[in-house]
Image: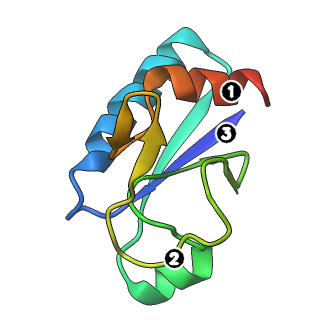
Amino acid sequence: MEITLLYFDDCPNWKVADQRLTELAAENPDLVISRHPVETIAEAERVGFRGSPSILVDGVDVFADPDDPVGLSCRVYQTTDGLAGSPTLAELRKVLANR
């Protein structure tokens, strides 16, 4: 399974997501994780970037809502712990289990 972390440097939340994905990769040796910075609005529009961090599983943004705007902004996730800048480790595990 391939996971891509899309982010932009000005948003600190991508580092939390990266740490959680690194933990998942240690648990699941079949995961391939790549990181891709999104640096311009044109690139954000081209890749459908819905904010930093965005997590693609096999090319699909598994947490995206079709109404989420595209652009260079920090993304907010509704988690079991309330609003957060990244999905929880448990939510990431659940997504992977459902794939």
Say which amino acid is labelled 1.
Leu
Residue visible at 37% across and 36% down in the picture: 82
Left or right of residue 48: residue 12: left
Amino acid carrying mark 3 in the image: Glu
Quarter of the image for residue 86 reads top left
Dot 2 crowding, Cα within 10 Å, few <14, some 14–19, many 20+ = some
CA–CA distance between discs 1 and 3? 10 Å
What is the secondary structure assignment of the residue under circle 1?
helix
**Which mark's residue is nearer the viewer, 3 or 2?**
2
SS for dot 2: loop
Residue indicated by mark 2: 69
Closer to the eye: label 1 or 3: 1
Residue at the spot x=60%, y=73% of the render?
Answer: 48
Name the residue furthest right.
99
Q: Looking at the image, tell me whether mark 3 or mark 2 is earlier in sequence order.
A: 3
Residue at image mark 3: 2
Question: Is residue 3 toward the left or the right of residue 1 in the image?
Answer: left
Q: Nearer the viewer, mark 2 or mark 1?
A: 2
Front residue (pair 92, 41) = 92
- Which residue matches tag 1? 96
